[in-house]
Amino acid sequence: MAGAKLIRERMDSIRDTMKITNAMYLISSSKLNKAKTDLENARPHYEEVVEDISRLQRHLPATINNRYFKDPSDRSVRTIGYVLITADKGLAGAYNMNVIKLLQKELDQNPDCPYVLYVVGQIGRVALRKRHLPVDEMFQYTAQNPSVHRARVISGRLLEDYKSGRIGEIRIIYTSEVSAIESEAKLFRLLPLEKTKEDKEKGVEVKDDFEFLPSPEDVFHSLIPNYMTSVVYGTLIESFKCEQNARMIAMQAATDNATKMLQSLQLDYNRARQSGITQQITEVSGGARAQKKKKEMREKS
């Protein structure tokens, strides 16, 4: 019965693990529902802000010279600030690794370009330190419970470094929802903005129905902080939703695998127990026959 005992201990261990995976599934499910509501409330706002910025860009004068816009003729090398949004915990499938791989791909494609890494989430910080990549040590933000206030603080820090010249470009690497069960890592350039000329290239006349007061530079100087806060909050909340969804799927898969293992081990346990019982019966029967034979020999003598 030693084999049956070991199998039973393993089954008990798997059941304990299943309790943990079930609890994590339920917790992620609860967080996912809240994240869905927050994203549904936030998405119209930040998408509209991005659209407004894009619409205003089409009416900018060609002579505008502003730090927030990229000059197509400028070929100088800019220090890129990468904002990497990861999770604080693992056990979420490939959620964290996908954004880290996208960052590594970007760095490999621009080997001569200087960069600064701003990381949200403990998993990302640990992973990048192991790769000996220069992570901004003062940029310590968690991925849990994203809020507008946190997005405002993060965007304020990024804007401060951008204005000071520490970085010349800001790119956000986050996880975007593709479907209810699928997500993918994406890269979005936050600053500088492009001087949009798409309508002119397509032969569409752009009516100058916008008047910038007191000047286009002042208007965008006022709009950019709100634009950055909206985009950062949108990416934080969307990444958080994808994280919870990925963890739910991973925990459900772990629970299903544990159930299959228990079913297989139950059969092994039944076989081992049946074998042990059969052996005990054989030993008892053998002992009874030996006693009977011994008794018969005494009677003959």
Image (cartoon, grey):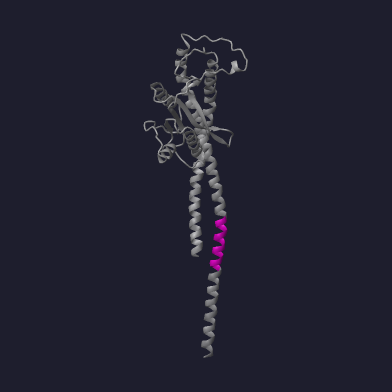
Establish if 216 lies above or below 123. above
Give the residue at x 56% y 47%: 256
Establish if 27 lies above or below 300. above
Residue 42 placed where, x, y %? Answer: 52, 25
Horizontal relation, residue 190 to residue 132: left or right: right
Give the residue at x 53% y 28%: 39
Horizontal relation, residue 148 to residue 205: left or right: left
Residue 234 in sight here: no
Q: Is residue 273 inside the magenta stretch?
A: yes
Residue 182 placed where, x, y %? Answer: 57, 36
Over which residues does the magenta segment extend? 264-277
Point out the residue furthest to the left here: 138
Corner quadrant of residue 89? top left
Point out the residue furthest to the bottom here: 301
Establish if 124 lies above or below 217. below
Q: Nearer the viewer, residue 218 or 278?
A: 218
Residue 273 in sight here: yes
Magenta segment, principal secondary structure?
helix
Establish if 109 lies above or below 59. below
Give the residue at x 55% y 35%: 183
Residue 159 placed where, x, y %? Answer: 42, 23
